[in-house]
Image (cartoon, grey):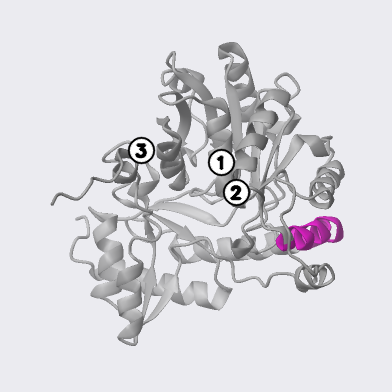
Amino acid sequence: MPVPASSRRARLIQASPIRKLNPLADAAKKSGIRVYHLNIGQPDIPTPADYWEAMKCRIPEVLAYGPSQGIPELREAICRYYDRLGTAITSDQVMITTGGSEAVIFAMMAVCDEGDEVICFEPFYTNYNGFATMAGITLVPVRSRVEDGFHLPSDDEIESGFTKRTKAVLVCNPNNPTGTVLEAGELERLAKLVERHNLFLLADEVYRDFTFDARRHASVLDLANIPEQVIVMDSISKRFSSCGARLGNIISRNTEVMEGILKFGQARLCPPTMAQYGAAYLYDKLDESYFRKVSDTYQSRRDVLVEELEGVEGVFFLKPEGAFYATIRIPVKDADDFAAWMLTGFNVDGRTTMVAPAAGFYATPGLGLDEVRIAYVLKEEDMRTSLDILKKGLAVYPGRKA
């Protein structure tokens, strides 16, 4: 008797290139190999202890459903966070989501119908592909280049991707997977384009607190000429080193958009309640000194990356400007094969390094085959060790480019 086929959506959705090599890493660990994970953005910085204390203080007799848009305490605390940054928003312009992932999905679904298109600069956070497939929309890639530090291409190149189905432009700033921080002038260029073409500007600002070398993050919320065309997606995962809390948020001054997003939220009932109490406390308690300390930690690790890899034969990248990622060109024909080989065929004294092949961060077939993403989320000693192993692997890899 025939078995029903799964949905087209289920068949088309992309497997995560960040996690697809996990079985090889697990097998290496079982054989006694220590694996240094530079493939995934999981910080090793401790979650602030006050997060747990704030939740303990609010343990209820019954853990009931919360509001679909999130508890008022958290939405108001987020408004105060932005107020300290000089950006005015109100609590009705904030929607709490189950992680930043849900924020991106909700934003896409709020501005696009099935078959519509969103411009996205590649390489981009790979899960945008999956979110777009689930929403029934198409990501249209516009290429940025490692030689330019992955900054925005020209207006003509951006507009070349526009069609009658284009509804939005999506940026990630600071960027995952490249570590690029868009300058205020670049955002102004985008603002003029979306205003001219009557589009939305979606901005993933999850890493906004981590910028290096005295840079300041410029938020799309401060673009004065397009206040109702801007939607920001954010998360506490990296801000408070709390990836497992699964708390994000959407911010928009567009009433119609927020009404639609609220209905999406009602369909999933509510975001995690107890985690919200912890997050609300941290948004109010942790000030600029906390974020500067964490950012300085990542900058020091960035500097280790640059020191260890800059000048290595066949390796090319520009110094990352924020977040904790770098997309790096390496002297191999197929980075997927190289990453797998590092887990199955190479180690130094029982240790090896895991990286993320970069092709999965592109939508255009054939791009990124000789690039990897490195997440510099390990303490400096482990960063040096893991990068030394990576260099030694590159030197003897059978598929190395001549």
Residue at image coords 47%, 18%: 159
Measuring from the top left, give residue 83's x and y in whole percent.
86, 42
Does residue 210 appear to the left or right of 144 in the view shown? right
Q: Marks 1 and 2, how far apart in space?
A: 6 Å
The C terminus, quarter of image: bottom left
Does residue 96 appear to the left or right of 290 in the view shown? left
Disc 3 is placed on an element classified as loop
| Residue 175 marker | none
Q: Marks 3 and 2, how far apart in space?
A: 21 Å
Measuring from the top left, give residue 329's x and y in whole percent.
36, 51
Label 2 packing within 10 angstroms: few (<14), some (14-19), many (20+): many
Q: Using the rendered image of the protein, determine whether residue 247 is visible from the camera's viewpoint.
A: yes
Query: Mark 1 or mark 3, which has the lower sequence index?
Result: 1
Task: Tell me the residue that label 3 is attached to.
Answer: 363
Measuring from the top left, give residue 334's x and y in whole percent.
24, 54
Q: 134 or 82, which lies in front?
A: 134
Measuring from the top left, give residue 141's x and y in whole percent.
40, 31
Disc 1 is placed on an element classified as helix
Amino acid type at image mark 2? Gly
Amino acid type at image mark 3? Ala
Q: Do the residues labelled 1 and 2 touch (CB within 8 Å)?
A: yes
Task: Tell me the residue that label 2 is attached to.
Answer: 100
Q: Marks 1 and 3, how far apart in space?
A: 17 Å
What secondary structure prevails in the magenta region? Answer: helix
- The answer to if 352 sits in the magenta stretch is no
Residue at image coords 48%, 49%: 177
Task: Tell me the residue that label 1 is attached to.
Answer: 104
Does residue 369 appear to the left or right of 351 in the view shown? left
Query: Which callout, 3 or 2, points to the residue nearer the camera?
Result: 2
Q: What segment carries the magenta color? A: 274-292
Label 3 packing within 10 angstroms: few (<14), some (14-19), many (20+): many
